Image (cartoon, rainbow, N blue to C red):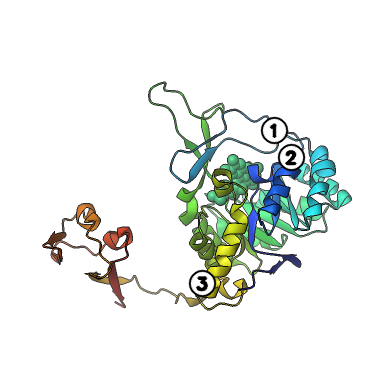
C-alpha cells in the first residue's frame, strides 16, 4: 500500500485528504465525524469575532456536483468555539486547523485566543471578505503572525488580478497557502416565482464543487510555481483523479467541502483509500512522489501545441455516435459502423476525443 503520510509545516498528517472550512467543520461533532470518516486533517469552519447571522435557505445545487452557498462564516461565538468545540476535536489525534477571518484587528484578537488555548496545530485565515489588495493582505498576515506561534496558512479566493504580487507579499510571512475558496458572487433563481433560491439579501452566493475544478487547478499550479511554501488544494474534488490532479499541480494535501456535503463524511477515508490504490496501480510508493509532477514534467512551452486529426480505436468504440452528434463542424459521420472524418471540415478542436465515453478517439500531438 502506498504511503499517504505527509508532513506539512512540520506537522505529520496521516493522509493528505482534509476537511475544508465549511459545514463539515461546523463544530466538534462534525469534525469528529470527519475524523472517523478518515480525514487526514481537520479544518474547522471559519470563526470571526462577530458570530455570523446566516440566511436560510443557504445551500442549493445549481448544477450536478456543484453547490451555491450563502453560509458566510460560523454562527458560534468565537470563545465558545475555541474553548469548547476545538478542544474536543483533539481527542481524534488528527491535526486540527482553525480557520479565522477577517480584518487585521479581528485576526489579532482571534490569533491571541488561539495562541492562549493551544487548540490548533495550524491556523488558516480567509481573505474572502477583505479584498485582494496585496498591501492589505500583508497587514492581515502580519497581524496574525505577531500573535501566533503555530504555522499560518493563507486561504486565497479566486479572481485575483495580482496573484504574483499577493504570493510574493504573503510568502514572506505565512507558512503555506490554501487555494481556492468558492467562486463568485454567483446567482440562481426560480423563473416561475422570479425569486432567488438563496436567502441572502441580494440572492447571491458562492459556487463550489465540480464546476470550479479547473479554476482551482489554475490557482494551485500558479501559486506552486511562485513559492516553495506548501500549497493545499481545494476546489471541485469529486473523485480520486481530481485529487491526483491537484497534487500533481503542486498541492501537498487537498481539502474537500462540497463532496462531503453531498455524499457524507465518509468521503475522506474513501478518497484516501482510492488515492493509495491509484498510487499503487501507477507504481508510486508514496504520495510525495507525485506532488508537483505535472509542473516538473511539463516542458516550458515556447510554442502553441499542434494536434493531429482524431483517430478511432474500433476496439473501444461503442457506436454511441456522440462524436458525430456533437461535432459542430459536421466533420464526423458513421457509415456501416465505420468512422469517417472529413479533414477539410475538422478543425482539430479535440472536443470529440474529450467527450467520447470510451476514450475511443484520440488526437495525436506533434511539435509544430
Ligand atoms: C456551504 C459552504 C460553506 C463554506 N464555508 C466556508 C467558510 O466558512 N470558510 C472558508 O474559508 N471557506 C468556506 N467554504 C469554501 C470551502 O472551504 C472550499 O474552499 C470551496 O467550497 C471549494 O472546495 P469544494 O469545491 O470541495 O467545495 C464553504 C463552502 C461551502 C460549499
Residue 305 location, quadrant: bottom left
Residue 5, relative to residue 125: is it above or below?
Answer: below
Residues at marks 1 and 3, CA–CA distance in whole angstroms:
39 Å
Q: State the residue in front, 105 or 294.
A: 294
Label 3 SS: helix
**Within-10-Å neighbours for mark 3: few <14, some 14–19, many 20+:** some
Label 1 SS: loop
On whether ligand 1 comes within 8 Å of the CB at mark 3, the answer is no
In the image: residue 98, left or right of residue 16: right
| Contact, mark 2 vs mark 3 (Cβ under 8 Å) | no
Q: Residue furthest left?
A: 335
**Picture quarter with the C terminus:** bottom left
In the image: residue 65, left or right of residue 82: left
Mark yes or no: residue 158 visible.
Answer: no
Residues at marks 1 and 2, CA–CA distance in whole angstroms:
8 Å
Number of marks drawn: 3
Residue 213, relative to residue 113: is it above or below?
Answer: below
| Contact, mark 1 vs mark 2 (Cβ under 8 Å) | yes
Residue 196, relative to residue 121: is it above or below?
Answer: above
Picture residue at 85% right of the left edge, 53% below the top: 118
Among numbered discs 2 and 3, the one appearing first in the sequence = 2
Among numbered discs 1 and 3, the one appearing first in the sequence = 1
**Within-10-Å neighbours for mark 2: few <14, some 14–19, many 20+:** many
Q: Whole-percent x and y of residue 331?
A: 16, 60
Q: Whole-percent x and y of residue 55?
A: 61, 28
**Picture quarter with the N terminus:** bottom right
Q: State the residue in front, 353 or 271.
A: 271
Q: Which residue is mark 1?
A: 52
Picture residue at 69% right of the left edge, 41% below the top: 26
Q: Whole-percent x and y of residue 258?
A: 55, 46
Q: Which residue is mark 3?
A: 295
Q: Which residue is mark 2?
A: 48
Amino acid at each position: 500500500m502506498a504511503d499517504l503520510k505527509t508532513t506539512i509545516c512540520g506537522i505529520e498528517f496521516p493522509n493528505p485528504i482534509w476537511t475544508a472550512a465549511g459545514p463539515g467543520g461546523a463544530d466538534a461533532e462534525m469534525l469528529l465525524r470527519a475524523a472517523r470518516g478518515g480525514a487526514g486533517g481537520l479544518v474547522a469552519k471559519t470563526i470571526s469575532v462577530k458570530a455570523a447571522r446566516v440566511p436560510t435557505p443557504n445551500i442549493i445545487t445549481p448544477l450536478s456536483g456543484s453547490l451555491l452557498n450563502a453560509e458566510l462564516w460560523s454562527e458560534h461565538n468565537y470563545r465558545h468555539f475555541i474553548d469548547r468545540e476545538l478542544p474536543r476535536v483533539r481527542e481524534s489525534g488528527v491535526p486540527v486547523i482553525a480557520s479565522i477571518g477577517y480584518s487585521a484587528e479581528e485576526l489579532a484578537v482571534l490569533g491571541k485566543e488561539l495562541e492562549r488555548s493551544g487548540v490548533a496545530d495550524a491556523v488558516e485565515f480567509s481573505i474572502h471578505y477583505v479584498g485582494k489588495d496585496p498591501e492589505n493582505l500583508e497587514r492581515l498576515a502580519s497581524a496574525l503572525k505577531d500573535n501566533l506561534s503555530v504555522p499560518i496558512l493563507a486561504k486565497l479566493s479566486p479572481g485575483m488580478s495580482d496573484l504574483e504580487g499577493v504570493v510574493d507579499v504573503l510568502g514572506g510571512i505565512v507558512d503555506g497557502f490554501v487555494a481556492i475558496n468558492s467562486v463568485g458572487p454567483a446567482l440562481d433563481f426560480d423563473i416561475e416565482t422570479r425569486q432567488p433560491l438563496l436567502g441572502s439579501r441580494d440572492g447571491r452566493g458562492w459556487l463550489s464543487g465540480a464546476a470550479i475544478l479547473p479554476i482551482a487547478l489554475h490557482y494551485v499550479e500558479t501559486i506552486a510555481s511562485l513559492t516553495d511554501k506548501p500549497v493545499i488544494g481545494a476546489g471541485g474534488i469529486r473523485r480520486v483523479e481530481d485529487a491526483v490532479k491537484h497534487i500533481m499541480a503542486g498541492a501537498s494535501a487537498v481539502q474537500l467541502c462540497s463532496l462531503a456535503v453531498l455524499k457524507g463524511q465518509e468521503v475522506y477515508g474513501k478518497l484516501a483509500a482510492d488515492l493509495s490504490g491509484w498510487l499503487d496501480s501507477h507504481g508510486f510508493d508514496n504520495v510525495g512522489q507525485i506532488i508537483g509532477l505535472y509542473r516538473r514534467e511539463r516542458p516550458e512551452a515556447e510554442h502553441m501545441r499542434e494536434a493531429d486529426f482524431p483517430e478511432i480505436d474500433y476496439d473501444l468504440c461503442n457506436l454511441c455516435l456522440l462524436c458525430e452528434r456533437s461535432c459542430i463542424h459536421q466533420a464526423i459521420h458513421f457509415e456501416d459502423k465505420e468512422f469517417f472524418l472529413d479533414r477539410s471540415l475538422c478543425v482539430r478542436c479535440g472536443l470529440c476525443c474529450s467527450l467520447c465515453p470510451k476514450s475511443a478517439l484520440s488526437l495525436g500531438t506533434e511539435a509544430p
